[in-house]
């Protein structure tokens, strides 16, 4: 295990890197947390490492001790900074990384970030989106229909540095196209994408994304639904098995 500090736009992100055993090179997962990231899916990280993958778990700027301020835009930048870290030749050698098999996995907000970052970085092999939040449409819909929206977002934002619920809402409202993951479909249509759904606020958005990918001609999209809550509380082992099985399936042709 290692704990590299990842530079991102002048700040330092803390991280945990779970290194697979053996000489490698190992396919590597970049695992992205949600908003604010209370569920960090470290049990999933251990399961993926047992299957022979490295797993890097960074903490966004302004979250969980990392430097800088949090924003959704910064989360996108931080994902790219983490990808760049994994692709640096010295890190490829030091951590026995297979740079041709970098897969992004994200939960909730992290699912949005994983999809966006995969779409905009051709060197990423594929991505798994676990109950991914479609940040723009979801926040607009919930503000209109959910009286608990502001309490929930204020509570989440209070755990992050340099932001507020009002600032984050203004951010997604300022550029609706950017914060709608449906606009990433054309850039994702040729890569493996796993959409894992729960019984939560994101189900319909997740289903729409899977259908849009299929209609765009993506023959590598996998969709699965589990009857559980947003953090997969009573389906943790089933969730881990589904992710590991998918990872093994998309890399079975790997030498």
Image: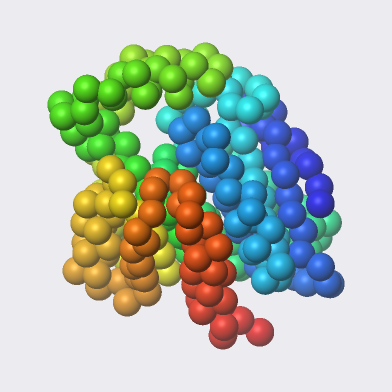
Indicate the position of residue 127 as horizontal and vertical percent values.
Answer: 47, 60
Q: Is residue 123 above or below residue 204?
A: below
Is 164 positioned to the left or the right of 95 in the image? left
Residue that appears at 53% across and 21% down:
160
Residue 176 visible in the displayed image? no
Is 24 positioned to the left or the right of 178 in the image? right
Q: Is residue 114 above or below residue 215?
A: above
Q: Nearer the viewer, residue 181 or 10?
A: 181
Indicate the position of residue 228 as horizontal and vertical percent values.
Answer: 38, 54
Residue that appears at 27% across and 52% down:
203
Residue that appears at 81% across and 52% down:
1
Residue 55 visible in the displayed image? yes
Is 224 positioned to the left or the right of 145 in the image? right
Is 64 positioned to the left or the right of 134 in the image? right
Check the image and name the residue furthest to the front.
234
Q: Quadrant of the C terminus?
A: bottom right
Indicate the position of residue 147 as horizontal and vertical percent values.
Answer: 22, 22
Check the image and name the residue furthest to the left.
144
Q: Nearer the viewer, residue 132 or 193?
A: 132
Indicate the position of residue 17 as horizontal and vertical percent values.
Answer: 73, 50
Q: Quadrant of residue 27?
A: bottom right
Type of colouring: rainbow
Residue that appears at 42% across and 69% down:
192
The total number of labels drawn is 0
Q: Nearer the viewer, residue 67 or 154?
A: 154
């Amino acid at each position: 295990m290692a704990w590299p500090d990842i530079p991102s736009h002048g700040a330092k992100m803390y991280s945990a890197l779970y290194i697979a055993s053996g000489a490698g090179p190992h396919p590597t997962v970049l695992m992205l947390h949600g908003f604010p990231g209370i569920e960090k899916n470290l049990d999933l990280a251990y399961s993926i490492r047992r299957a022979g993958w490295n797993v890097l778990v960074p903490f966004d700027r302004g979250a969980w001790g990392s430097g800088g301020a949090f924003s959704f835009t910064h989360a996108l930048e931080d994902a790219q900074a983490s990808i760049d870290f994994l692709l640096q030749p010295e890190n490829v050698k030091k951590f026995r990384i297979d740079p041709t098999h970098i897969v992004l996995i994200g939960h909730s907000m992290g699912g949005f970030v994983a999809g966006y970052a995969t779409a905009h970085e051709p060197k990423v092999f594929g991505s798994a989106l676990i109950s991914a939040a479609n940040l723009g449409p979801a926040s607009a819909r919930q503000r209109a229909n959910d009286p608990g929206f502001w309490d929930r977002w204020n509570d989440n934002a209070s755990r992050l540095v340099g932001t507020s619920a009002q600032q984050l809402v203004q951010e997604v409202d300022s550029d609706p196209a950017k914060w709608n993951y449906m606009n990433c479909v054309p850039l994702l249509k040729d890569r493996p994408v796993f959409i894992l759904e729960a019984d939560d606020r994101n189900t319909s958005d997740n289903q729409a994304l899977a259908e849009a990918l299929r209609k765009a001609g993506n023959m590598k999209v996998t969709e699965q639904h589990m009857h559980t809550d947003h953090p997969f509380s009573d389906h943790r082992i089933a969730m881990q098995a589904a992710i590991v099985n998918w990872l093994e399936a998309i890399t079975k042709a790997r030498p």
